[in-house]
Amino acid sequence: MDTMQDIIDLDRYPLDRPESPEWQALVARARAELARDGMFNLEGFLKPEAIGTAISALVPRFDGESFTHARKHNIYFRKEIPGLAPGHPALREFETVNRTLCGDQIGGVVAALYDWPGFARFLAAAMEKPVLHTMDDPLARVNAMAYGEGEALNWHFDRSEFTTTLLLQAPEAGGEFEYRSDLRSDDDPNYEGVARLLAGGDPALKRLTLGAGTLNVFKGKNTAHRVTPVKGARARIITVFSFYERPGVRFTEEEQRGFYGRAA
Ligand SMILES: [Fe+2]
């Protein structure tokens, strides 16, 4: 059984010492970066050996039993938007392709991290939530995605306020995270701005290249983002951790089938 000391660089990121001055300083840094940049990154969060262990466990499963998720979608993941004509350039469609593993196919280091209370406690503090809970959903709780050559996660806004990911393997090239901060707001959908971004004409677009082992927490509800197509033989492999403010959250069967091609 792996201990957290073997998985997380606890010297750098003292998640095992909640409320200590070092832990509070890390929380303060995360909050400040979320407010300023809409995200924070903890580079080298996962120890190199743990990255290797996680990759070795996941790669055979990606090859043997993953769900290939390929779909055409617009930035809203909805066919129609009330008030927008069907041909509006903000509704331009793109393709997203990846291979996905679900919570019931992921064990070892990744599952141990997800289920460790110190992880949720730190994330809750960083996100200024009283508490965060792991999901009860056997599929959705933690996912791993592999993007092979030419595959991409295309333009979208997130459903949830925060998204927590951990990059396990960076590709040789491509697979860059692109985002346009605060492209819309809860009050203003800014369809013209969305159309301009999708046409490649937004000068405020930013790009981020992450290294393996980096924990990223991102506010993606109103910040448009995508991952550009991967280049080269090495896949981009990333895990996504889902937490909720209330306990016991599960997807509906329809959501499970939509995201994972099966129900459980
Ligand atoms: Fe996203």
Image (spheres, grey):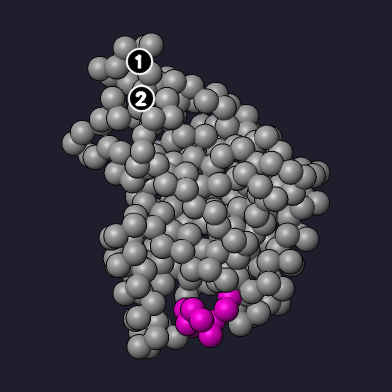
Q: Nearer the viewer, residue 251 or 203?
A: 203
Residue 195's disc is 2
Residue drawn at x 25%, y 31% as measured from the top left:
189
Label 1 residue SS: loop
Tell me if 212 is positioned left or right of 233 in this view.
left
Q: In which quarter of the image is the C terminus?
A: top right
The x and y percentages for residue 180 are 37, 42
Q: Mark 1 points at which residue?
A: 88
Spot occupied by residue 118 in the image (x, y as percentages of width and height): 47, 75
Residue kind at label 2, given as amino acid type: Ala
Q: Residues within 10 Å of mark 1 (few under 14, many from 20)?
A: few
Identify the amino acid type marked 1. His
* 88 relative to 29, above or below: above
Q: Residue at x 68, y 72 (%)?
A: 48
Residue 164 located within the stretch drawn in magenta: no
Q: Relative to 227, does residue 39 appear above or below in the rendering?
A: below
Residue closest to the far left: 187
The residue closer to the viewer here, 145 or 246, is: 145
Q: Is residue 257 visible?
A: no
Question: In the rendered structure, are the residues bearing label 1 and label 2 in contact, judged by CB atoms less than 8 Å apart?
Answer: yes
From this viewpoint, is residue 57 visible?
yes
**Which mark sits nearer the N-terminus, 1 or 2?**
1
Give the residues in magenta: 8-16
Along the viewing direction, whichever of 48 and 208 lies nearer the viewer: 208
Q: Residue at x 41, y 72 (%)?
A: 122
